[in-house]
Image (cartoon, rainbow, N blue to C red):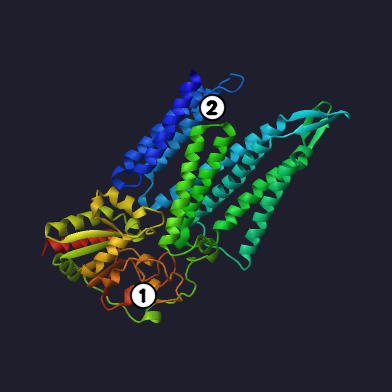
Amino acid sequence: MELNILTLIYLIGAVTFILGLKMLAHPARARRGNLLAAFGMCIAILGTIFLYKDEQGNGLHNYGWIFGGILIGGIIGTLAAKKVKMTAMPEMVSMFNGMGGACAALISIVEFNRLVSHPVITSLPPSGFLSVVVSQGELLIILLGLMIGSVSFSGSMIAWGKLNGTIKDFSFKGQHILNLIILAGVFVLAVYLFVNADDLFRFDGTSAVFTLKGHLIFYGVFVLALLYGVFFVMPIGGADMPVVISLLNSFTGVAAACGGFLYDNKVMLTGGILVGAAGTLLTILMCKAMNRSLANVLIGSFGGGNKSGVTGQKQHGTYKEITLSDAAVLMAYANRVMIVPGYGLAVAQAQHACHDLEKLLVERGVDVKYAIHPVAGRMPGHMNVLLAEADVSYEKLLEMEQANEDFPTTDVALVLGANDVVNPAAKTDPSSPIYGMPILEVELAKHVIVNKRSMKPGYAGIENDLFFQKKTSMLFGDAKKVLQDLIAEIKNL
């Protein structure tokens, strides 16, 4: 009866994961979808703790350790989630994703030690020599979970460090060859262990002990996989970090699914498969939005910073500035204004001021919309979450294709901290690293106002041709203060 109840709980948990994931597809339902999936996870965890029985009928018993870990982790997670700023959301996602990969790798280590500590000993007649049989299926899943989880953990930690600025892009000549050598080493050791596991035991009387050589090979796979994760992410530049985060997220999901296989836990398996599949699909969509292949993202090292140090004036001529009063008049008497948010808006925590400006313009009869690029910010959906926090209506958020259709009839395009996603070089300059990447075509608007702190290039380290076009005016300053000053100017008109 308990098994049936636990199976039912797992079924409910799996259904909540699927429904929650589907609800995440729309901002209006995303919060409820997240809570629904969290509820399913909670009942699955509690069901496992209190109802699980192994083949001998034994259940879990270390309740103090289990609930102590849950309490400590819950407190840390809650405090981290409440204190994190919207600008730090991408790195927090990388951190949490890395922890998931670490858990999967640790599960593989624990289960490997259990597997080799209790081998099946058989005799081979007529000689009577003892032999050991290791479950090849279990060993395969353990090795896969170890490799994928380790890469996800170390790669996510490097991504976390790069996003918060503590780790810089690093690459050297021949690094991709070194990466391939390390990856080949991981697979060679793993295959050797998988094929020869039965022969890596020594017999002590009637018992079998796994040899030091066998342990060294296993932990060699672990260390090399960690090393590969570091070198895998290290050369990838800032502009590609959203794709890397999504890809590593899919790795963690697959590693978690391996744990589900090991424990024959249906809900863990379902959750891992959903995360892995969703992360893979999102990675493909992100690459499509950038008009680049995944191989190009992983090998191209695009966005690693501009080494030239050449300013816009030297390359493109001069730019022109606009005063707050002129910008206020231009926007207040426009028929349609399109706001293009970018990472600079998040840095300044200006989403609420932006919403206040939108409401003020709407009161004056201006049609205001937001143009959202799929890879704006440093994480998929970063701008959507940012604006949702300020209670911006979801109907005002236009996807790239729809926004590009509206730009020709837009009087003013207000770009707030966006750089690479509005760079016309993606369409006009074949020599540009972002050539072919779909962009928000803000240059089609009648007037373009760009708010930036300075003329420094964006996160990808590429100069933006938009800033030097005749219809573009620069409005320098912190986004929050500039928006507040714009609001004051418009109120005085």
Q: In this view, does 436 lie above or below 250?
A: below
Provide residue 15's location: percent of width, then percent of height.
Answer: 41, 34
Residue, x 64% and y 36% (percent of image)? 138
Nearer-the-camera pick, 223 or 373: 373
Q: What residue type is labelled 1?
A: Asp
**Marks 1, 2: nearer the viewer:** 1
Provide residue 206's location: percent of width, then percent of height.
Answer: 82, 26
Task: Tell me: 466 left or right of 331.
Answer: right
Residue 164 visible? The answer is no
Provide residue 414's location: percent of width, then percent of height.
Answer: 25, 65
Q: Quadrant of residue 339?
A: bottom left
Task: Tell me: 310 left or right of 125.
Answer: left
Nearer-the-camera pick, 347 or 98: 98
Q: Which amino acid does label 2 sit on?
A: Trp
Numbered circles on residues, count: 2
Which secondary structure lies at badge 2? Answer: helix
Quarter that holds the C terminus: bottom left
On residue 457, the disc is: none
Gap in angstroms between the C-alphas marked 1 and 2: 58 Å
Q: Residue furthest right?
A: 127
Which residue lies under the disc numbered 1? 465
Q: Residues within 10 Å of mark 2 (few under 14, many from 20)?
A: few
Q: How crowded is mark 1: few (under 14 residues within 10 Å), some or many (20 or more)?
A: many
Q: In which quarter of the image is residue 445?
A: bottom left
Which residue lies under the disc numbered 2? 65
Which secondary structure lies at badge 1? Answer: helix
Provide residue 109's location: percent of width, then percent of height.
Answer: 64, 38
**Of pointers 1 and 2, the one earlier in the residue sequence:** 2
Task: Tell me: 269 left or right of 29.
Answer: right
Residue, x 63% and y 35% (percent of image)? 110
